[in-house]
Amino acid sequence: MAVNTGNVAELVGSNEQTILPEWIELQKKAGSLQTGRITENELASQSREFLHLLRDGLSRGGSEVSNSAYGPAKQMLADVSRSRALQGFSPSETATFVFSLKQPIFNVLNRNTTLSPAQAAELTWSVTLLLDELGLYTLEVFQKSREEVIVRQQREIAELSTPVVKLWDGILALPLIGTLDSQRTQVVMENLLQTVVETEAEIAIIDITGVPTVDTLTAQHLLKTVAAARLMGADCIISGIRPQIAQTMVHLGVELNVISKATLADALALALERTGRAVTRLKKATPASGQNKMSAEKGQ
Amino acid sequence: MTTLKTERLDIRSSDDVVRVRQLTRTMALAAGLGLVDQTKIITAASELARNTLDYGGGGFVLAELVEASARRGLRLTFEDKGPGIPDVEAAMKDGFTSGKGMGLGLGGAKRLSNEFSIHSQPGEGTKVVIARWK
Amino acid sequence: MDRIPILKFGNALLVTIQVDMHDRLATALEEDLTSKIVEHGAKGVLIDISALEIVDSFIGRMLDNIAAVSRILDAETVVVGMRPAVAITLVELGLSLAGVKTALNVERGMALIQARLKTSDEDDDDAED
């Protein structure tokens, strides 16, 4: 269908001074400025720029949004949409930018006397379709930008929530807080193993005091972490299994075939002992002189 | 989902298995996968390429760089015209092997991927598709 | 055909894998190592895989086999330098290499082998720190 959108382009061009204020007024009425996220000046300059780009598109691109003549207009919509998504605009606030342009353009088409009613109706229809499509495009970019934000935040949260701390030379602790799903387990493993490499650690204590429940799946994730650490030459001790969790684990038939200690303190004591250091509370060891001997015995 | 780039590689010898790994690495980098995700998909590709060679009597891999809802990923399709797998469910289990492998190939490749599908008919060959997303 | 070089290091053998191994190379290494252990009467085998970007089930099986064979020949195999990403992937794949000893780097691996030799010879002090 060959609709001569060139007419519309001319009308939009010659009636810019009517369309622009009306459009901006409609946007303000829809609440575009209420949140204070953009200023009236910004809104006005965005509106003016888009109107110009739309006019360029209409004069050469016909009624097909896929026509390359609409490229700059779409590019601008994408930029506006993306920045609004990041600024926290709602989808409808963002889409209003395009949809509210319909009325001012229709008004201009209707008031025009050189067009026959049939011509005016036909042009109105094609402008409707065109702006609908541009509006949907805006929403699509908006949605995509929001998804990007979510993906980035997920990654940040995952990294924030899994610190690896050095307790002693060669001894690391990994205090786990919250539930362990497979994605988080991967981040936990990466952090732990990377720190093992950096600090040349021999022992890692995984403290699960902050883990609410240990079901079969969580146990599997823990065991995978232990196995991966072992492949790099580091041994793991699990600490902080609360009484209720220990009971649930037994009831569920969950087995953790690794060394576990009730508290982080106990685990640290064991880790020190294994790396050839004495803790004075140990009754077997006589302080200082017994150190080396003991480590040799334990090492066997 | 849109495909941004496609590469095809024949799998005829054990050198081709190495080539599949290299191709997978290049594509995984293009998809922007992190180091661990890269390693996982390359390892999965290595397992499946060896399956294609050892059990399928050779075939090819199709590597596609794909994009869907703001995420990029890598999709690999391994296809052969070999004898096929009579019982796919059993073949997915760890420890199952009809040859000289460890029987971790299929199940392992599935665990290393975000998406996994397999189609096989006795006498008509096997097609395995895996994908890993950023 | 290419072969991966095996170095003698005291009473231990050191193998550094530096290439993306195809399967024949892995099989050849397994055979070469077995005969070298016997030839040198080696008590330990260190396999440095820090350059390997992936370990799949084939290479995993090779490491397992080398460890098992060397154990029969009274030598201890220690795999050293596995990269974090490789370790994570291997566990996910379902391989834990339970029969293989591991260490962070060549130095630690050598210390493991020496410690074993000492304890099997006589009681000796083993001061690490």
Image (tube, coloured by chain):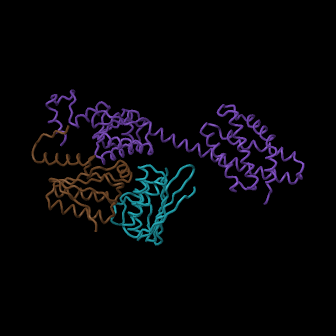
Chain colours: A purple, B cyan, C brown
A140 is higher (above) or lower (below) than B66: above
Task: Examine the image and state in which quarter residue A294 appears.
Answer: top left
Q: Is residue A246 visible?
A: no
Q: Is residue A223 visible?
A: yes
Question: With C4 as the anchor, is A124 left or right in this view?
Answer: right
The percent coordinates of residue A68 (x first, y second) are: 68, 56
The furthest residue to the left: C122
Q: Nearer the viewer, residue C127 or A264?
A: C127
Q: Quadrant of the N terminus of chain C?
A: bottom left
Question: With A205 as the anchor, is A30 left or right in this view?
Answer: right
Identify the residue at horizontal 36%, vertical 43% (top origin).
A194
A139 is higher (above) or lower (below) than A262: below
Question: With C57 as the anchor, is A4 left or right in this view?
Answer: right
The percent coordinates of residue B127 (x first, y second) are: 48, 65
The percent coordinates of residue A259 (x first, y second) are: 29, 40
Q: Nearer the viewer, residue A193 or A63?
A: A63
Q: Nearer the viewer, residue C48 or B117?
A: C48
Identify the residue at horizontal 48%, vertical 42% (top origin).
A155
Q: Quadrant of the C terminus of chain C?
A: top left
Task: Examine the image and state in which quarter residue B1 appears.
Answer: bottom right
